[in-house]
Image (tube, rainbow, N blue to C red):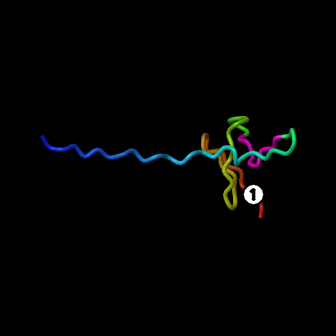
């Protein structure tokens, strides 16, 4: 029988959620904004001119 070529699955990068919080003492602050449509726990991505939710595509444009 011929040998099988089995390709390994690529591992997706982790979400690094610990980088999205700032802990100072007993207080935890979020670094990014939360999506107003999706609620707490869904962060908005910060682009150079806008904030965008990856889940529902809600976008807020920032003023220059």
Expressed as whole percent of the image width and height from the top left, the position of residue 10 reads 42, 47
- Return the residue found at the far top: 39
* Left or right of 26 on screen, residue 13: left
Q: Nearer the viewer, residue 61 or 18?
A: 18
Q: Which residues are magenta?
A: 28-35
Describe the element under mark 1 as helix, strand or loop.
loop
User: Can residue 31 be found in the magenta stretch?
Assistant: yes
Q: Position of residue 26 (x, y in %)?
A: 86, 38
Residue 20 on image: x %, y %:
71, 47
Using the image, determine if residue 31 lies above or below residue 39.
Answer: below
Please name the residue shown 29% across and 44% down the image.
6
Check the picture and name the quadrant holding the C terminus. Answer: bottom right
Q: Which residue, given by chain and number where applicable, does mark 1 sit on? A: 62
Q: In which image quadrant can residue 3 be found?
A: top left
How many C-alpha atoms fall within 10 Å of the one at disc 1: few (<14), some, or many (≥20)? few
Quadrant where the N terminus is found in the figure: top left
Q: Height in image: 56 above or below 60?
A: above
Task: Kindly identify the residue that appears in the image at 60 percent across and 40 percent down.
Answer: 55
Q: Quick check: is 4 in the magenta stretch?
A: no
């Amino acid at each position: 029988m011929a040998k099988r070529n089995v390709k390994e699955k690529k591992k997706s990068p982790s979400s690094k959620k610990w980088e999205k919080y700032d802990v100072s003492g007993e207080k935890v602050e979020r670094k990014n904004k939360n999506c107003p449509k999706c609620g707490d726990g869904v962060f908005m991505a910060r682009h150079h001119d806008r904030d965008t939710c990856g889940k529902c595509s809600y976008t807020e444009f920032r003023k220059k």
